[in-house]
Amino acid sequence: MSLFAKFDGIRAGVEALLGSVRNPFDVRFDRVLSPTEALLEGRPVLLLGTNNYLGLTFDPACVEASMRALEETGTGTTGSRIANGTYSSHALLEQRIAEFYGKRSAIIFSTGYQANLGLISTLAGRDDHLLIDADSHASIYDASKLSTAEVIRFRHNDPEDLAHRLRRLKGRPGNRIIVTEGIYSMLGDTAPLREIAAVKREMGACLIVDEAHSLGILGANGRGLAEAAGVEGDVDFVVGTFSKSLGAVGGFAASDLPDFDLLRIVCRPYMFTASLPPAVIGSVIAALQRLSTDKSLGARALSNSRRLYGGLEQSGFKLGPEPNPIVAIKMPDPARAALFWNRLIDEGIYVNLALPPATPGSLSLIRSSVSSAHSDVQIDRAISIMTAVGRELGVIAAR
Amino acid sequence: MLSGRVPQGVQVSSETQILRGLGLDSVAILDFIMDLEDRFDISIPLDRVAEVETIADLSGAIETLMRAAR
């Protein structure tokens, strides 16, 4: 039996679904021109599915900082920090992240995925209890698998259910660790963080909040949902990524706990992987500075999100519950979702096709991510094309 | 509890393989298990779910967890 035979079902499912549409796992841009435009199959396409929330990937200050770091410090670190040492820029970025969040310390990881994988799997040890939201990102599920703790899912965004599950643990030894996200990546909904923080306090648990999609978007200073909800003091660990609002790659965790830096000698996804290259660190430091000094970036991303959400809602689409930079259209079935996604590319719009089991509630979604760099004209064009395609495919009623 | 979830025509017995025999994706299976948790007022940790192959295994795991919770 082939080593890959176990994936026959998945392969058959993908082949049956795709038929004559493009393969969403193999979209190859000829060239990316700006935060909102690329060339695909020789034609211009509007980028509306790349999580480039603040549009900083081509920001002159970020590009210049990256190039300067590249010239001064070389192309890569060629290994891990425990073997090859910490560059001064790694330490500077960690200091800047800690300052940004007002936390005692921050640790950077090579990706956001690894930040969750490392932090959660290391903190949640044998006899501990890890309570994760049912709609958690794959990195949180994978961290749960790597952890030796008991892992319990609670109903999505349901503090009552979380409290109930914590009460069931009464009398059992071990730490209780709750994991939630600021903005959820598929439907763009936010967590009821004030209520979750109250449960955390009442039950004596520890709280990890992944602000991957809310950094730069929510809160007066762009620190995310915890800032917006006024519960930063209840969050024991903030996790985030450099690959969305900050326009590069990498992840981080920040905390006030005095022993936090012990992770540097016990957290394997931090220790045994290559550290971020100087050019990435350079642009992230510059992007964090841009985010901190230009509050209009996050505000513009949110107003653009409301424009897209409002327009699609008016056209009759069923959407996720909140107008955040992730705007998800609920499709009637996977086949229609694939056709819709494919037709949008024909019409020059790139979004994400999100299908079960990668989605909550087995939903088939067309997922857009809105940027502060999108113009009103671009968003209105996207609404107009999505509406026309929606009518053509019977997703919404004809005019 | 499974009747409203599995696709039409799927026959379920105690020997049915949960991952391959129910016609449900992995998230739908976890959501079904969450309903079972509510019904029996227990939490079934994900590492226990990973050990379960058949409906009979799942039933056995629930009985064990209910006894432990008493």
Image (spheres, coloured by chain):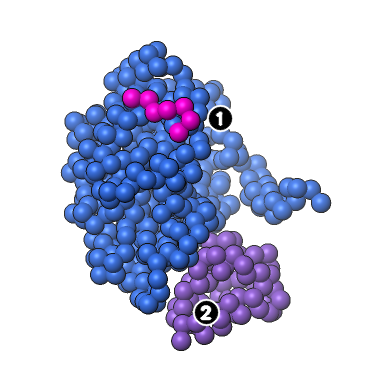
Chain colours: A blue, B purple
Q: Nearer the viewer, mark 1 or mark 2?
A: 2
User: Is residue A352 in the magenta section?
Assistant: no
Look at the picture and state if A71 lies above or below B54. above
- The residue nearer to you, when weighing A345 against B42, is B42
Look at the picture and state if A217 lies above or below A124. above
- The residue nearer to you, when weighing A305 against B33, is B33
How many tags in the picture? 2
Look at the picture and state if A201 lies above or below A277. below
> Is residue A199 at all visible to an observer of this figure?
no
User: In the figure, residue A278 lies in which quadrant?
Assistant: top left
Amino acid bearing label 2: Leu
Q: For the residue labelled by badge 1, is the local secondary structure a helix, a strand or a loop?
A: loop
Instruction: Give left or right: position of A49 versus A24.
Output: left
Name which residue lies at 37% across and 77% down.
Answer: A171
- The residue nearer to you, when weighing A52 against A90, is A90
What label does residue A28 carry, if any?
A: 1
Q: Position of residue B47 (x, y in %)?
A: 55, 65
The magenta span reads: A82-88
The answer to whether dots 1 and 2 both sit on one chain is: no
What label does residue B65 carry, if any?
A: 2
Amino acid bearing label 1: Arg
Name which residue lies at 50% across and 72% down.
Answer: B44
